[in-house]
Amino acid sequence: MNRIIMAENYKHTQIGYFTIAVFSVVFLIVLSVYAGENLADGEGRVLPVTLLILLLFLINFSTLTVKVTRNEIIWYFGPGLWKFRLKLDEVQAVAVIRSSIWEGVGIRWNPYKGMLFNVSGQHAVKIIRKNVKSTRIGTNQPQELLQAIRQSAGFTGQQVRL
């Protein structure tokens, strides 16, 4: 049996403390609102469903893991139910950027800036693909991620400001 081994040049998981705090506060507010209420039959089913949805969002969007292998960049939220991949041979340019605080956290699309994947903070690495589409991956280690991508993609020379 042939197995393809993808050596990791870089792997980092960022914890979104702000995201965890917000979901925890909302969870506790919802729980406290319903705790003192005398709920009718239909309303009694809403509480567990609401709390379950909040818990699933908390688990899935509390961390962002980024891996750089010899062939691709892989990133995913939480336990990795949905993984995003970008082959390194599709990368045209890469640079460290700061996202706007107004862009928030999670998965965001901006028609002028492309996709943003973020759990906390404003630091990100912007990747321009050969088809000119851009992807921004939030990280609290922007220089390390930039170097890992540049090294794995075989980029040499000066860094590009995007």
Image (cartoon, grey):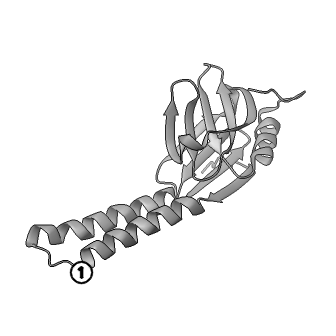
Image height of 86 relative to 76, above or below = above
Q: Is residue 32 shown left or right of residue 114?
A: left
Going 63% across and 49% down the picture, which residue do you hit? 3
Of residue 14 and residue 130, the one placed in the foreground of this image is: 14
Q: Is residue 59 shown left or right of residue 121?
A: left
User: Which part of the image, by quadrant, shows the C terminus?
Assistant: top right
Q: Position of residue 86 (x, y in %)?
A: 61, 35
Q: Position of residue 17 (x, y in %)?
A: 59, 63
Q: How many marks?
A: 1
Image quadrant assignment for residue 136: top right
Going 65% across and 58% down the picture, which residue do you hit? 13
Of residue 6 and residue 37, the one placed in the foreground of this image is: 37
Image height of 93 relative to 26, above or below = above
Q: Is residue 148 shown left or right of residue 133?
A: right
| Extreme residue toward the top, this view | 131
Per the image, the residue denoted by label 1 is 36
Going 74% across and 31% down the picture, which residue do you hit? 94
User: Tag 1: residue type?
Assistant: Gly
Q: Position of residue 153 (x, y in %)?
A: 77, 33
